[in-house]
Image (cartoon, grey):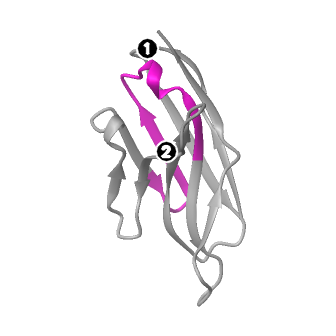
Amino acid sequence: VHLVESGGGLVQAGGSLRLSCAASGTIFELSAMGWYRQAPGKQRELVAIINDDRRREFGDSVKGRFTISGDYTKNTVYLQMNSLKPEDTAVYYCYARIMTTWGSSLTEYWGQGTQVTVSS
């Protein structure tokens, strides 16, 4: 299984970006999919995730500004980031929890990360 991210870049404060992540490979069930981020010198933190019951969960710092959506026919998740702030600057990692074959255990996968930089 591979997670391929796209959409990162440089944006001014107050602007918007949309990240995409597509999962490919042998996928029987996509249990959860979403995004984490890691800024320099900080721990990786949850940004947004769609859980197996399709419930959406957001990090406190992005609530009301970011939205997450998924296209399960394409095994793809999108992160719409609005009203971006300099403190949103980080490497954003796609995350997925996948059952590759029927009856197998759920396995966690990570993308390689995409840089998001918000200038003041």
Figure check: 75 above or below 90: below
Number of numbered discs: 2
Q: Amino acid at mark 1?
A: Ala
Q: Residue furthest bottom?
A: 103
Please tell me whether residue 91 belongs to the stretch shown in magenta: yes
Residue 15 as seen in the image, left or right of residue 77: left
Q: Secondary structure at mark 1?
A: loop
Residue 56 as seen in the image, left or right of residue 117: left
Q: Amino acid at mark 2?
A: Tyr
The residue located at (65%, 36%) in the rendering is 114
Q: Secondary structure at mark 2?
A: strand
Q: Nearer the viewer, mark 1 or mark 2?
A: 1
- Residue at image mark 2: 78
The residue located at (39%, 15%) in the rendering is 14
Q: Quadrant of residue 101?
A: bottom right
Tell me how far mark 1 sits from mark 2, CA to CA. 20 Å
- Residue at image mark 1: 13
Residues drawn in magenta: 70-93
Q: Residues within 10 Å of mark 1 (few under 14, many from 20)?
A: some
Q: Position of residue 104 (x, y in %)?
A: 62, 86
Q: Residue furthest front?
A: 41
Q: Quadrant of residue 2?
A: bottom right
